[in-house]
Image (spheres, grey):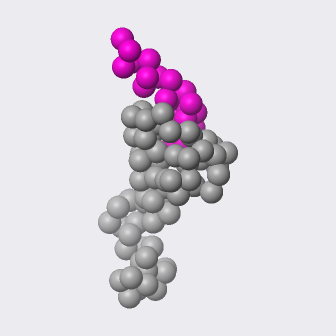
Amino acid sequence: MAGWVNLSPYHFARLFRATFGCAPYQYVQEQRLIRARDHLRQSTTKITAIALACGFNDASQFSRAFKARFGMTPSQCRSEAHSSKSR
């Protein structure tokens, strides 16, 4: 990303953190997790396919990051979303 805006990686990271309040990697990770959560809630696509489509290397990496961010596993999120729809 730093190369896209002609800045050194250090300077880019410093400006990014000042602007968004987090490191570039954290921002990208958050966007991937939000996108994945939306997919889990709205589709029946396999969790592994969602993980890969959202930029994670594998389902276990995705599950760890998802649980750390949202406090539940991807399958729990899906179950919760689908059970609330059927009420």
Is residue 62 toward the left or the right of residue 85 in the image? right
Residue found 65% across the figure and 51% down from its top: 58
Residue found 36% across the figure and 67% down from its top: 18
Expressed as whole percent of the image width and height from the top left, the position of residue 23 reads 46, 64
Residue found 43% across the figure and 35% down from its top: 43
Q: Nearer the viewer, residue 9 or 43?
A: 43
Region of the chain picked out in magenta, as a range: 66-87
| Residue 7 within the magenta-colored segment of the rendering | no
- Using the rendered view, name the quadrant where residue 63 is placed: top right
Expressed as whole percent of the image width and height from the top left, the position of residue 56 reads 57, 55
Residue with the most extreme front position? 45
- Using the rendered view, name the quadrant where residue 48 is placed: top right
Question: In this rendering, is residue 14 above or below 38?
Answer: below
Question: In this rendering, is residue 25 above or below 63?
Answer: below
- Residue 11 visible at all: no
Expressed as whole percent of the image width and height from the top left, the position of residue 26 reads 48, 58
Quarter of the picture holding the C terminus: top left
Residue found 55% across the figure and 35% down from its top: 74
What is the magenta segment's predominant secondary structure? helix
Quarter of the picture holding the N terminus: bottom left
